[in-house]
Amino acid sequence: MALKFRWRKWYAKSNNLSEQRVFGERPNIVISTCFQAAWEKLIKYMDIDAKFIQPSYKDFKINTDEISSAIDDHTIGVVAIMGNHYGGQYDPVWEINDIVEKVNKDRGFQVGIHIDAASGGFIAPFQEDLPDWDFRLKNVLSISASGHKFGESCIGTGWVVWRQRENLSDHVAISVSYLGGMGESYNLNFSRPASGIYVQYYKFLRYGISGYQKICEHMMIHAQKIRERLRKNEI
Ligand SMILES: Cc1ncc(COP(=O)(O)O)c(C=O)c1O
C-alpha cells in the first residue's frame, strides 16, 4: 500500500493530474510467478495488476532479463522473494537493484523494491557470503518478514520495515491519540493480539544474535543432508 500511494503521488505530479483523476489509473507490481498466496490477495483486494515473470527453470529464481521490459510508468515496485515457499530460493535482489537503478535513471521513474522475506527474514541475516540484500541497496524500500516461521514466534506475527518514513511509510500510518499517548497503526485490522510480539521479544533476548546464528547453522546442515539424500533418491 505504501508503494501504491507513493506511486500515485509521483504519477499525479509527473502527469499533472488531480488527486481524483489519478484514482482512475491502475498500478501494477512486478513479481515472479513463485509468489505466495498473500500476493494474490494484494492483487485481488487492492486493485493492483500483477506483471508476472517466469522464474528460470534452472534455478527457480526470477528471470532478471525480463524485469526491465516489465516495468512501466504504472509500476509501483518490483518484488524480490527471499526465499520462495517452494524451494526457498532467493531472487537475486542485488541484481534487481542494478536493473531498477538503470530503469529509473534512463526513464525518469522512481520504482523501488519490496523484499518479501517472509521465509528468509530470519535466515538471510545469518548466512555468510550473501551479497548485500537489504537497505544497503539503494532501491530497497521495504522488507517484510514472518516471525512465526524461523523467528520461532506465534502464528500471526509478522514485520514490515520501511527504509524511511517520509513519502513511504507515512502514506499508510494512521495516527491515533486515544490509547494513552500518540500511536501509529499500520494494520488493516485495528485490534490485534500482542502475544506474538511478547514471544518474539523473549526469543530475541533469549537467543540473541549468536543463538539465531546457531539455529540457522543447524537448519542449513539439515537442509544439506536432506538435499544429499534426495539427490541419491533415498527419501
Ligand atoms: C514468500 C512468502 N511470502 C508471504 C508469505 C505469507 O506470510 P505470512 O504467513 O506471515 O502471512 C509466505 C508464507 O508462507 C511466504 O513464504
Image (cartoon, rainbow, N blue to C red):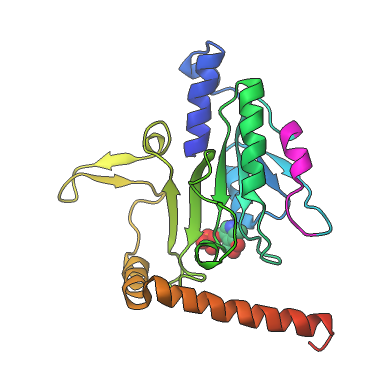
- Camera sees residue 130: yes
Residue lying at 60% horizontally and 21% vertically, measured from the top left = 108
Number of callouts = 0
Find the magenta span and give its range: 59-69
Which image quarter is the C terminus in? bottom right
Quarter of the rendering containing residue 129:
bottom right
Q: Above or below — where is 197 with respect to 22?
A: below
Residue 14, x across and y down, in percent: 54, 15
Q: Above or below — where is 151 with respect to 178?
A: below
Residue 163, x across and y down, in percent: 43, 42
Q: Among all residues in the image, which is located at the extreme front?
A: 129
Closer to the camera in the image, 98 or 149: 98
Residue lying at 66% horizontally and 22% vertically, measured from the top left = 106
Q: Above or below — where is 183 with respect to 59?
A: above
Closer to the camera in the image, 5 or 69: 69
Q: Magenta stretch containing residue 67, yes or no?
A: yes
Ligand 1's quadrant is: bottom right
Q: Magenta stretch containing residue 26, yes or no?
A: no
Residue 101, x across and y down, in percent: 61, 33
- Camera sees residue 152: no
Residue lying at 62% horizontally and 47% vertically, measured from the top left = 94
Left/right placement of residue 201 relative to residue 57 reads left
Left/right placement of residue 89 relative to residue 200 reads right
Residue lying at 73% horizontally and 55% vertically, measured from the top left = 61
Residue 22, x across and y down, in percent: 54, 20
Q: Among all residues in the image, which is located at the extreme left?
A: 180
